[in-house]
Image (tube, grey):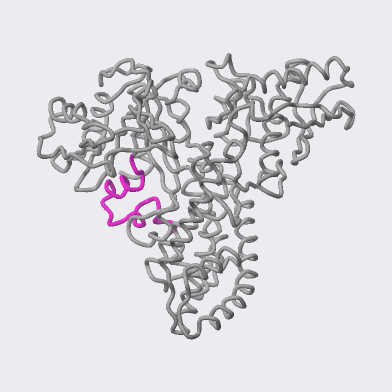
Amino acid sequence: MYSKDLRKHFFNFFHSKGHVRVPSSSLIPDDPSVLLTTAGMQQFKRYYTGELNATDDFGSQRIATIQKCFRTSDIEEVGDKTHLTMFEMMGNFSFGPVGSDDPEDDGKEGYFKRAAIHWGYQFITEVLGIDPDRMHVTVFGGDDETPFDGEAYDIWKDEVGVPEDKILKGVREDNFWGPTGEEGPCGPCTEIYVDGVEVWNIVFNEFYKERGGTYRKAERPGIDTGMGFERLSVMLEGVDNVFESELFRPVMAKIEELAPNMDEAIKRVFADHLRAATFLIADGVVPSNKEAGYILRRLLRRVMAYQVKYDVHANLFEEMVPVIKELFGEIYPEINDSDRIIGVFETEKTKFQEAVSRGLKEMEKIFEENREEKRITGEQAFNLFSTYGFPIELLKEFVEGKQFTLDEEGFQKKVAEHQETSRAGAGNKFGGHGLVLDTGELKAGSEEEMKKTVGLHTATHLLNWALRHELGDEVKQMGSDINPERLRFDFTFDRKLTMEERQKIEDLVNDKINANLPVYMREMPKEEAEQLGAVAFFKHKYPAIVKVYSVGSEASGGVVSREFCGGPHVEYTGQLGSFKITKEEAVSAGIRRIRATIG
């Protein structure tokens, strides 16, 4: 079975069980506790807590996705047969409250352990055709913090019929998941193994971990299932490793054509990093020395360092983007903007060449300072990279040539510390959106400016709604420009606003700010967004799958604003403070402009 068939069978199976297919969310998360999307459930955290209602937004408490994910911990491991930085995670989810836990029920209500376990087993054995004799399962064995999951154990043994010697009790590190960040939904999990390899992980979100470390029973127990799409593809195709699978074969073939004499491990690094970087850029990340931009820069500069080492002169970036687009463009339309993606690659290549030139001078100073010890410390190596962008892979070449040693472990420790600092910083940012983004519409020169700019971006959505509410649906957005000081919003209207209209619009926006409404994003087919009444920028062309940001929910009194938008936004309108229109004027015949501030 190949990847296209696996996607189809997965969604068809869970559709038959009442699940609604939801598109993958961005690699840039709404969750401020993490730099990048690391799991399929991240976009759904507020459905588990009850802040949002899945039936209101999706038409069901049962959801199925294949989510693109990114884990920075695996960057140094890439090159072997299994590790990837970006990967896809298949998942089926239930947000509760539990309506029926009968595996035969194909309704829209929440379900829990019985249904989730039966469906996982059924999909693997009946749909994928895997012999049960090749399988074993694990359940959480319990510890001082949370108890043994005897319920899952009994379902496997008594209902599914798995022999007791094939039901293993696991420790917390293996069989308890979450939360993402310091607090949130979490719980014990049961895993399905085939030929000793984990292929399916079902998390029973029956706990909520408080920030102080206390576990309490969740008010809305839910299901969070994860299956590594690449890992499952390898098993079903019967190949030796992920880079021989259908998902990577065209990429590896192009690398072999462009750089035939490299080590196999380096070819895999190229394949992984170029694919991952393409997706990061497509989601709005640009290279920088902080947060998600720092991760992207590491990927790109590792590739460029190996190009120098192996004397590869081909333009890997330009050559690889069309291959990745051909493989994934239909599934993830955001990567089809080849010109912009290649442009980011080329800009970073120029900066890399400049960085190497500057870094070489600094490196020679370090060699001179350490000529007696003949050792480069981890901190010195990290400073070379963080300050000058000088890759560790290139530094190692010079170290070996001069017969020095390098504290690579110390370097990795400094990298980990940097990531942890960035992650903590992201969690404290305004709405979690401190990432360096290239949206074209938002302009900010620092993280502090970005905080204000993101708030003003959300304010434009409220302003757009208020204008239509007060002046009529014939009002259309004609453009906007946002910097840290103000927003500028252009719209169709054939006369100057009266002072009463201007005040009414301002009051409408402030009412919604004071209501502290939730702001959240869903990705969906363009036709579905239009049916929901999402407002589109009048002049813009949209892909088949779009991002839609909504303000308000049924739980908060109804959706106020729903727009096609790439983000970022704050999480709650109350974070805006207050809204003030500073000027309203004509731009041209039939086009008006409003300038406004928040604070």
Task: State which quadrant residue 583 falls in.
Answer: top right
Q: Quadrant of the N terminus?
A: top left
- Taking the image as shown, residue 357 lies to the left or right of residue 588, namely left
Q: Residue 456, how many percent across, how many down?
A: 71, 34
Comparing 314 with 375, the one in front is: 375
Up the image or down, 557 lies above or below 464; here it is: above
- Taking the image as shown, residue 54 lies to the left or right of residue 387, namely left
Number of numbered labels in the structure image: 0
Comparing 242 with 582, the one in front is: 582
Name which residue lies at 51% across and 41% down. 332
Based on the picture, tell me whether residue 299 belongs to the magenta stretch: no
Q: Residue 440, how many percent across, how many down?
A: 70, 44
Q: Return the residue found at the far front.
A: 212
Range of magenta residues = 227-252
Up the image or down, 425 lies above or below 407; here it is: above
Q: Residue 323, how many percent across, how many down?
A: 50, 54
Comparing 124 with 98, the one in front is: 98
Based on the picture, tell me whether residue 231 belongs to the magenta stretch: yes
Decide whether the magenta segment is chiefly helix, strand or loop.
helix
Q: Residue 423, how many percent across, how many down?
A: 51, 47
Up the image or down, 499 lies above or below 79; here it is: above
Q: Quadrant of the C terminus?
A: top right
- Taking the image as shown, residue 503 lies to the left or right of residue 338, namely right
